[in-house]
Amino acid sequence: MALAAIGRGMGGAVAAAGLWTLLLLGAAAHEGHDHGAPPPAATGKLAPRAEATSANFEIVAVPSGSELVLHLDGFADNAPVEGAVIELDTPEGTQTARAAGPGSYVVAAPFAAVPGTHDLALTITAGGAVDVLTATLVVPPTTDVPQPRPQAGPYAGSALAPGLGTGLGGQSAALLLAVGVGFGAGVVFMRLRRGTTSTVLLLAAALPLLLAGFAGAAEAPAVRDASQRLPDGTVIVPKPSQRILGLRTLLTATGTHAQAVELPGRIVPDANASGLVQASVGGRLAPPEGGFKPLGTRVKAGDILAYVYPPISASDLKDLEQQGHELDQQIAIVKRRYERLSAIRSAVTQKEVEETEIELQGLMTRRATLERVQREPEALRAPVSGVIAAADAVAGQMAEPSAVVFRIVDPNRLWVEALSFSPDAGRAGAEGRLPDGGMLALAYLGAGLSDRNQAVPVHFAVSGAGGGLRLGQFLTVLATTGEARAGIALPREAVVRGINGQSIVFEHASAERFVPREVRALPLDASRVLVTSGLEPGRRVVTRGAELIDQIR
């Protein structure tokens, strides 16, 4: 009876608590209710950090427990500086940082874990440059920068515990706490009326754990040191993320640049350093001593590359044999006459002896020539020095007259033939861009007058060694037109397209802050654009990784 009385006494209180909870729930749901767009997500905070820059270096110091992590980059190009010596003046004395990765260094700094303002003095020595930089590190109190606390209780390590402590403010936590109290009190009241004391005791023991779980909802989000975009469009990229993205910058400078046009071109041999090996008569090919030379073999002018044996038909062979017999007969007759005249020189004139001797020598020469026609082949010799670029020689192959058997090219003397609508394109300078991105320096030689589908062939000489180039290889010729414009030249990848289609570059305003700038960019050549407005000289502009920064939200 006493327990029932207590239950009836608590009934009114619990009912009042439940009603008060519902009123709180309705008030909280209605307070601040907005039918418009939801508010933007809160931006995560960055860990405390200090930064300093000079004409050579840019450094960011981030505390990590009792140590400072130092990220050192070049000021102009944002490239990590390796092999540097960094000394930090601390209350315990001068500390030397140790390398912890490309451009990253760690130095012992127990004071970095103490809240407050700390002045830093760093001496940096790298690449022959020595700079002394100063910075101020502000470590806020732990209450201002809450850290994630380990979970306790029956939900420790479960998926429920983290969910309760993220994304909720103080008002939401209070609301959930009131609902939990009302719910628990109602359950206790119902069990009391039924007289299940064990259940009441179990719920009473579980109620503090439930309240502790809801209390975790009042915690603020943990510090999140990650890339983020601010409402004004500025992008914050911490130094570790910059290393991952491979960001590089360039100091802008105003100059006068000539525009260039792209022309299709191909590699052709230098007419003065190339030649063809052809057979003057038809015949059967035969290798020289040592065999046919393979492609790429370097040869000298005059080297024998192959032999051509002229074919002789059966009828021609019989005619040659008959001519040989006739010549042999004439030689025998003239030889005997010469011998008789030589024996009686005193009885004959000297003229008769000399004429007979000359006739004998002529007949013997004709006989030797006839013999060579049947047996001696034609030697194919290299007309110029160079390498064998093409070959079509097989032992026993029948070579047609004027057929190209070998092609000799000097790889160090090549030309480029391009097609242009203007014969003056490239006269002021030109470059060749290969499919793999390599560049060639070209010298203007001249332009033709023949019409090739309204285009004029223009010849350029490849300056320097042309190693790796092939005849017929296609490339793009960047020919200067001679029209100069003033502006800032940037790589094409530095300019990205904004949401409205406007050309945008990212200025490296500070160590981890990138500001988008709307610019007007005109094509300059195949790899660069010319910024004529929207950007001032002396600014650091992202030249590699701008597209990745633009994707950060």
Image (tube, grey):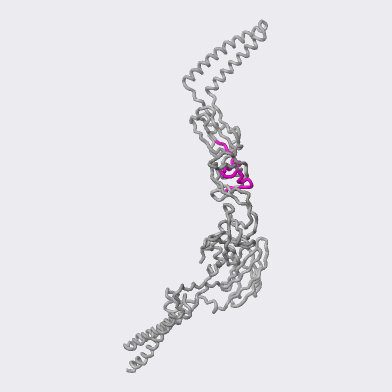
Q: Nearer the viewer, residue 99 or 218?
A: 218
Place of residue 7 in the rendered image (x, y in percent of width and height, measured from the top left): 35, 91
Confirm whether residue 208 shows in the render.
Answer: no
- The one of 63 and 173 positioned closer to us in this rendering: 173
Question: Residue at coordinates 53% horizontally, 14% vertically from top-left?
Answer: 326
Outermost residue toward the top? Answer: 347
Residue 187: name its quadrant.
Answer: bottom left
Residue 140 position (above or below residue 79): below
- Residue 39 appears left or right of 494: left
Q: Position of residue 280 (x, y in %)?
A: 54, 28
Q: Relative to 473, does residue 40 appear above or below in the rendering?
A: below
State the residue in front, 227 or 59: 227
Q: Is residue 9 left or right of residue 258?
A: left
Residue 518 can be seen in this image:
yes
- Give percent across and percent down for residue 268: 57, 41
Farthest residue, direction front: 454
Which residue range is magenta in the image? 407-432
| Above or below 160: residue 309 | above
Residue depicted at x 59% and y 11%: 334
Residue 321 shown in magenta: no
Q: Who is closer to the viewer here, 334 or 430? A: 430
Residue 350: image quadrant is: top right
The N terminus: image quadrant: bottom left
419 in the magenta segment? yes
Q: Position of residue 62 (x, y in %)?
A: 58, 70
